[in-house]
Image (cartoon, helix red, strand yellow):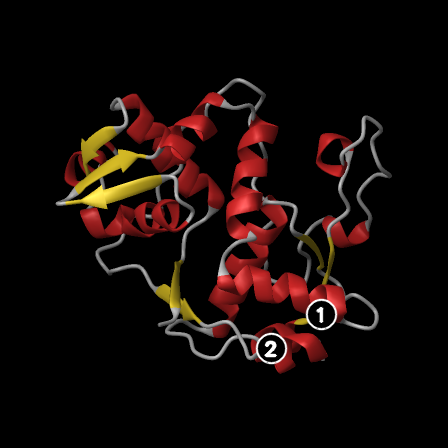
Amino acid sequence: MPTVYPKCSPTEMLGLVVLLGNHKGNEEIARLADDLDLEIDEILPSVDYAQLLGLLKVSEGRAVLSDLGRKLLAGSINARKEIVREQLAKTALFKALLRALESAPERRLTEEEMLQLISFTTAPADEFVQNIINWGRYADLFRYDSDEHLLLPARRTGRAAGGGRKGPPAGPEEGSAKGSGVPPSPTPTPTGSEPPVANLAPPRSRRKPASVTLMAPPTSTAAKGT
């Protein structure tokens, strides 16, 4: 069975988890939607993505924080990002992308090569590619060169690199998404503060948000990396 990757941003999902934490970690999804002045199907992508990452469980219309979700809420901004990074790296899609990126001769993937790793989708290509790139950049799994439209290995700094020294400043590839149509990575809030929940909800819409259905490619394709 393919894995479904809902289309939502990291800030939308984290906002949903924060809101659930404010409800003592156990609340009806309909109530969470009411708090955000949204329809239930408008917050389902965030609920589904949080469940995919193991941050909460859903049963009989209620969302319940997992132990990992509570650990995320208790952590710093860097600790939260580390949890998201570790959980994303376990998913079929991101595992395949990282394997292909590592095995590529020049350790870079074009958007066309990314598409070769995706067998099926229910959303337009530009939408799911942007979503994948945004999540990978947020979690520091990889970088994106917006001028050349290339996926590049992550440049870890500070704690993420396992050392106390910071690495060199971000290069042009991590600047604006000029010409790519890819929104920049979410700007982290100050350590110890929570993202404003009310501003993390998706735009008001009566249409059911699109979900992306993706499958990991055969091993031979990922290994080729071209």
User: Where is the C terminus found, in terms of image quarters?
Assistant: bottom right
On screen, residue 45 versus residue 166, left or right, reads left
Residue at left offset 39%, top offset 44%? 54
Image quadrant assignment for residue 217? bottom right
Q: Amino acid at mark 2?
A: Thr
The label nearer to you, 2 versus 1, is: 2
Front in this rendered view, residue 4 or 146: 4
User: Where is the N terminus found, in terms of image quarters?
Assistant: bottom left
SS for dot 2? helix
**Residue 7 vertical placement versus 222 (above, below):** above
Q: Amino acid at mark 1?
A: Leu
On screen, residue 48 versus residue 161, left or right, reads left
Front in this rendered view, residue 94 or 189: 94
Image quadrant assignment for residue 191? top right
Residue at left offset 29%, top offset 30%? 20
Residue linked to disc 2:
219
On screen, residue 51 versus residue 217, left or right, reads left
Residue linked to disc 1:
109
Q: Earlier in the sequence, mark 2 or mark 1?
A: 1
Front in this rendered view, residue 157 or 98: 98
Please provide percent x and percent y for residue 154: 73, 50
SS for dot 1? strand
Please provide percent x and percent y for residue 163: 80, 30
Please provide percent x and percent y for residue 123: 40, 71
Marks 2 and 1, how far apart at CA = 16 Å
Residue at left offset 66%, top offset 55%? 177
